[in-house]
Amino acid sequence: MTDQPQIFADPNLERLGLALSALVAEVSILSERMAAVLALAEERGLFGEADVEAYLPDDARSHKWQQARQALIANVFQPLVPEGDG
Amino acid sequence: MMDANARPPHSLLFPASISERAREAYWADLKLYLEATVRPRLRPIYEREVRPALVERLGREPDRHEIAGAMLEVDENRWWYLLRTQSQRRAFDATRAIVERQLPQLHERAAALGNGPGSLELDPELKVPAYLQVQAHCMDGGYTGEGGADMLAAGATYDRGMTLHRMGTQGWLCDDVGRSLVAWIQQRFPDFAPRRILELGCTVGHSLLPFKQAFPKAEVLGVDVAGPVLVYGRARAAALGVDVHFSQQNAEKTSFEDGSFDLVFSRILLHETGEGAIPAVFAECNRLLRPGGLMFHSDAPQFDQLDPYTASLRHWDIAFNHEPYMSEYYAMPLETMFEAAGFDPDAMFRASAPSLRLTEGAVRPEETRSGGSYFLAGAWR
């Protein structure tokens, strides 16, 4: 949390708002990245949206994606989590 | 819409990666949405619910403090405050992360540009005034780059942030204010041809450069207490090929000779300074100007120009955006203070310079925080 003054009487509501705004950031970034990948692939005649939907990752990729997912969760929910290393 | 990443307005602004710029653009767009779409919808709540209750309780019309306090009880406005603060902070964080990753590139480019046509004079001994906010408008490090040793990072963050966070509403060189102010001066005072011009608190030169471009024969100088923004400003001016001179000095007391300027001005400087500094700045303007010279200061309009509800909107900046001196500055009787600094009351003016970007149809009024014009107050010496 930042040093800014409290706005809502209920701090949980405040944290939820911060989490929500961070979540939408991630969704927005992801959408733009995905749009860039698809645009590149289509421009170069490689694949389209249906190929992406049907794709199955191997184990190494699955692991990498899980790490990314966990980082996303930690980032989005950070405002709801107590400060410090625990 | 044109993207400044795809076509950078000058060679010190480098494209960010897609993830970086999507993050930066998200927080910037959230700010714009909150300013242009959400905030106007809060006024009807005030008129319909909050004002009648305040009038009944107080037995009179409420002032800006009472309105701001009562509006903080309105949930919709609380969400606005929360998200506006977060988007302000996170937009600068995103920009700073981009600039930090690009620092080697930035230094290389700045070194290659050399001095350009202008000059830079730093004073490492200059004491930074206590009023300068380390987190001015939620930009970590503020103007001085406190906490980081890099001499280009603070200016680059400020420049990139100002350019991209307003989605180009100021123009991609962030110069709409400067261009609009100088256009107003040239139109209003067509015979005024300053030979030497000084901007106080010029930061990276967003408003300074348009004065050189409008008065190409004039010698144009800018001072600021923060060295890092001047280092970047010199490099940026070199990149744009504009001949301006930057000097690290305090506007309260500069090293220039008496009567050595025809025009001395500031833009969004005074609300960053404390109550004690402002009379000294006005007195310094009087000292620096030749007889027949012009002083003006441009900032958001004084509270006495606004209706109480509009004035109450500044509460967010004051309490949440690290702009504590706005409250006292916008309440100051400028003309009384100009007179105390030696200016003649008959030679003073207040004006509103229309935004050229708005006149050109490039932006809508609600997209500009200024409402489409720039307030200025000044006096002839």
Image (spheres, rainbow, N blue to C red):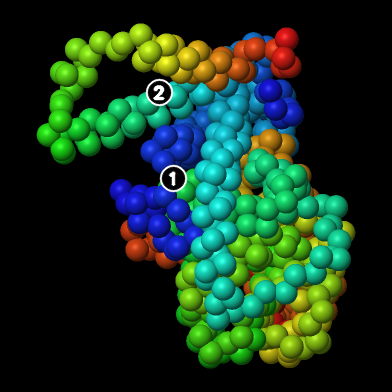
Q: Image quadrant for the C terminus of chain B?
A: bottom right
Label 1: how many residues lie within 10 Å, few (<14), some (14-19) or many (20+)?
Answer: some
Q: CA distance from mark 2 to mark 1?
A: 18 Å
| Residue B56 image position (x, y, % from top left) | 68, 25
Left or right of B254 on screen, residue A31? left
Give, as a three-letter code, the residue at label 2.
Val
Report the label total. 2
**Residue B348 appears in the figure:** no
Left or right of B174 on screen, residue B246? right
Which disc, if any, is residue A27? 2
| Residue B290 image position (x, y, % from top left) | 73, 89
Which disc, if any, is residue B41? none
Q: Name the residue rendered at 33%, 32% in the picture.
A: A32
Do the dots labelled 2 and 1 sit on one chain? Answer: no
Give the SS element for disc 1.
loop
Q: Name the residue rendered at 55%, 77% in the picture.
A: B116
Give A28 or B116, whichever is nearer the viewer.
Answer: B116
Give the SS element for disc 2.
helix
| Residue B5 image position (x, y, % from top left) | 39, 50
Answer with the quarter of the image where residue B377 lies: bottom right
Give, as a three-letter code, the residue at label 1.
Ala
Residue at the extreme left of the image, as rendered: A45
Label 2: how many residues lie within 10 Å, few (<14), some (14-19) or many (20+)?
Answer: some
Which disc, if any, is residue B16? 1
Give B243 or B278, whichever is nearer the viewer.
Answer: B243
Question: Can you say whether B116 is above or below A34 in the image?
Answer: below
Indicate the chain on which mark 1 is placed: B
